[in-house]
Image (tube, grey):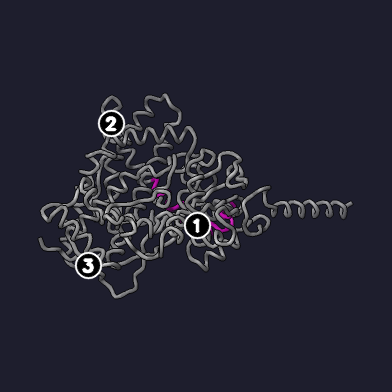
Amino acid sequence: MMVSLLCLVVTLLAFLLFNDMRRPKKYPPGPAMLPVVGNFLQYRERLKVLGYHHLVWMELFQKYGEIVGMKLGRNYVIGVFGADAIREVFNREDFDGRPDGFFFRLRTFGKRLGIVFSDGQFWQNQRKFSIQHLRSFGFGRKEMEEKIHEETRCLIEAFKRNGAQPIHMHDAFDVSVLNGLWAMMAGQRFETDDKRLRRLLQIIHDAFRLVDISGGMLNQMPFLRYVAPNASGYNQIREILERMWEFLEETIEDHRKTFFVSQQPRDLIDAFLQKIDVNNDPTFTDDQLMSLCLDLFMAGAETTSNTLGFAMLAMVLHPDVQMKVQNEMDREVGRNRWPVLGDRIRLKYTEAVLMELQRRVTIAPLGIAHRAVRDAELYGYLIPENAIILTNLYSVHMDEAFWKDPYRFDPERFLNERGDLSVNERHYVPFGGGKRRCLGESLGKANIFLFFTAILHNFRVERADDVELKLEGHDGVTMAPKPFRVRLILRQD
């Protein structure tokens, strides 16, 4: 009897393990799967060799084609490559969801909250509310530009006080960039030397390095938090989140003490508190307010600041490009004032430099993960409901068939023979596309242009150390420039 029972158990276990290795019907091609862990071990091995998540996926693209099917832990994860296939994902409602899983809920109190990783009607309502009220506090309007100008002025003054002493430039923009958004969100700004905030921003940068956009090890095998809480990153992520929650809770509590529902909201947090008090929509809760602030704070503190850090690095690596930008500004704007957003139409080479930077670096090389909201077909393959979809924007920006010599930094590829800007939007997608296109695109573009031109209007940027510098950065959810120092040499009027 015991032998028969043991045989039955072994047979059943063998069947389950074998079944776990089978690819779903019509699932995209990819490497063979192991039971329980799927392709996790192979993926991590290639990551150790190549160093970047997007390069692991590019290697799979070269072998299997523009749609690649993997299983990482318990998650079906599909890589999509090339301009046409990625555009298909962006433009179909079938793929408009955001991933759901342990890591994505860990950030938001075990629920699906916030604005970055929520979807459906909840996301639509929260996005509409956020945009509407951010606009009323300046987002996308002249007031936004004025706020950014004030931040550029404060930063330039701080740089001038420093003289020609070496400056760590990879994170020099963190506080100043965040201030523009934080003024609309929380009605306040921080000094550029605010030590507490700088520590908090460093924590955020660390958080973006701990995982990849698919949710990483914790999302793929959440049980690891019990058996390997440090190795899986669980303890580090919890610590980071608790620091962030504490900071945001203090900010929100200050608003509760000073805002009366009958008065006019001063910022986004006030508007949200007013909405909670009206109590006619159950999606407006204290937890959602914290999650929304977390999403906006982390996004505002990371991508634009990193882009500007890479921009300064590119100017050090390409002094001829730096000089062309300065000559164009001197010619088109003059030395008596700094450029404003209205000057972009005339600063064509400068715009081309910033576009080439965002193409060459690709701050979010795997985009923001999508989720299939239902079973759907893509290029003849079945994409199962709830599969995570990674749009490899790096494959678009580094496509050798379209961008000749794509590793070369060449702003003139965005200028036609008349010197006018020329952009093929199918092959240039730094802010994603479709309904889930980056919410903060207009703010990001304004920040990048105004800070970049203000620095180059006032200073010549030179390397401070005799070390090798490259545009390749740290890997993670987003790319970040590796630490580097520059000297800012004041330009003469």
Between circles 3 and 1, the one closer to the viewer is 3
Q: How many labels sit on residues?
A: 3
Q: Position of residue 108 (x, y in %)?
A: 46, 42
C-alpha gap between disc 1 and disc 2: 39 Å
Q: Position of residue 326 (x, y in %)?
A: 19, 60
> As rendered, which of 359 and 182 lies closer to the eye?
359
Looking at the image, is mark 2 or mark 3 earlier in the sequence? 2
- Contact (Cβ within 8 Å) of mark 2 with mark 3: no
What residue is disc 3 on? 487
Rendered residue at 87%/52% (across/down): 4
Mark 3 is surrounded, within 10 Å at the Cα level, by few (under 14), some (14 to 19) or many (20 or more) other residues, namely many
Q: Is residue 394 left or right of residue 159?
A: right
Mark 3 falls on what kind of element?
Answer: strand
Mark 1 is surrounded, within 10 Å at the Cα level, by few (under 14), some (14 to 19) or many (20 or more) other residues, namely some
Between circles 2 and 3, the one closer to the viewer is 3
Extreme residue toward the bottom, this view: 466
Q: Quadrant of residue 317?
A: bottom left
Extreme residue toward the right, this view: 1
Main SS, magenta residues? helix
Between circles 1 and 2, the one closer to the viewer is 2
Mark 2 falls on what kind of element?
Answer: loop
What residue is disc 2 on? 265
Rendered residue at 30%/38% (across/down): 254
Looking at the image, is mark 1 or mark 2 earlier in the sequence? 1
Placement of the C terminus among the 4 image quadrants = bottom left
Q: Position of residue 222 (x, y in %)?
A: 57, 51
Q: Is residue 223 left or right of residue 390?
A: right
> As rendered, which of 420 and 264 lies closer to the eye?
420
What residue is disc 1 on? 233
Task: Give the magenta part as a residue range.
Answer: 222-245
Q: Is residue 243 magenta?
A: yes
- Contact (Cβ within 8 Å) of mark 1 with mark 2: no
